[in-house]
Amino acid sequence: MTMDPAHGTIGGEETDQRDPQKNNFADLGDNSQPHQEPRRINNDPRARPQKGNQPRRDRRDVHGWVVLDKPIGMTSTQAVAVLKRLFNAKRAGHAGTLDPLASGGLPIALGEATKTVPFVMDGRKRYQFTVCWGEERDTDDIEGRVTATSDQRPTREAILALLPRFTGVIEQVPPRYSAIKVQGERAYDLARDGEIVELAARPVEIHHLTLVDQPDSDRAVFEAECGKGTYVRALARDMGRILGTYGHICALRRTLVGPFDENDMIPLDQLEALCDRAASGEGSLADALMPVETALDDIPALAVTRADAARLHRGQAVLLRGRDAPTSSGTVYVTVAGRLLALAEVGNGEIIPKRVFNLTGLTASPGRNERN
């Protein structure tokens, strides 16, 4: 057994949805949505099941990640449905919802990659977002109802002076339209019913917050990278109040989700073109997949023998033996002959399997194992 020194340990973060299936102008975590779905309908027929007497193809095993550069106007749920159809995959899910009004990275897990979704959702997220000054809205984004206005506009100097107050570990009150539970009810449900929702402040971490551009006095463009549970909408709201005006999010793009950045993203039209070429025998859908273990980049890798792999595959613990046995403890991902086998815990002289992977079927092309 040998420990791969190229890997370290994992970080943490997740997103919130205003609605159980959608994120709205995000949290740099994930959660919320105040308005009814008809306002967000996407008329793209690719996002809806086809009716009629068309024969249904048998779903197949497909394992890996596709990082969709999600277009504005598509829900995360629709995006998953489109990719599941394109790959004819049995299982699919996303790692951190992205609102229809937002664009950018939406990591979609296919097959066994769904077992690694929590590691992506717990990772850092980076957003570029535009704050429109002079209005505060009940949802803290452009979709909401205006609740306060101001003629004041912040100067560049005032904005720059404020940024350190929103960097590091800060106390943040989540938006009223969020999926946080209040006495067993979602905050957004209570807010929709007209109830006054008072949410407690909680600590969140913003790793960096920078002013990117100030196109005019009404708008400012920022970039933020943050940890789990941070709301960009709340960030815009709070900055606007302190600056003596009001603010809400009017544009948002996600550029980083855990280990996936803009270099990993693929636009939907390119993905569809690749699928068309694959259907005609001119390419392979495997070229669009990233390996399942890409989501585990920050976790140590541990190679085992085939004999030990057989035990782990049956769910049995393996004793660590010999001078090559790792001395560290905690979560590792286990490989055999370079192939992902399991997620496991190392401790007390044993490897204890927690999640075993069965990668039979379509997987990423060998070249995709090397990140660009």
Image (cartoon, rainbow, N blue to C red):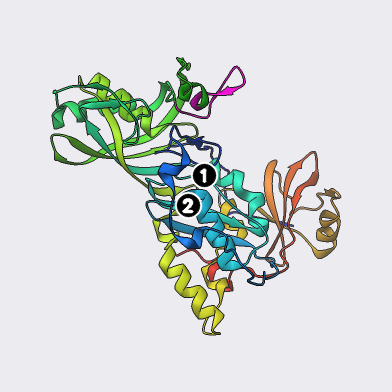
2 in relation to 129, above or below: below
Residue for badge 2 = 106
Quarter of the rendering occupied by the C terminus: bottom left
Q: Position of residue 245 (x, y in %)?
A: 20, 22
Which one is nearer the viewer's eye here, 29 or 299? 29
Which one is nearer the viewer's eye here, 85 or 315? 85
Residue range highlighted in magenta: 177-188
Residue for badge 1 = 96
Residue 180: say if magenta.
Answer: yes
SS category of the residue bearing label 2: strand
Q: Is residue 364 left or right of residue 76?
A: right
Q: Position of residue 93 (x, y in %)?
A: 59, 52
Evaluate whether residue 167 shows in this view: no
Q: Please tell me which residue is depicted at 69% across the width and 66% down the height of the picture.
A: 59
Q: Position of residue 276 (x, y in %)?
A: 50, 77
284 in relation to 180, above or below: below
Which one is nearer the viewer's eye here, 211 or 17? 17
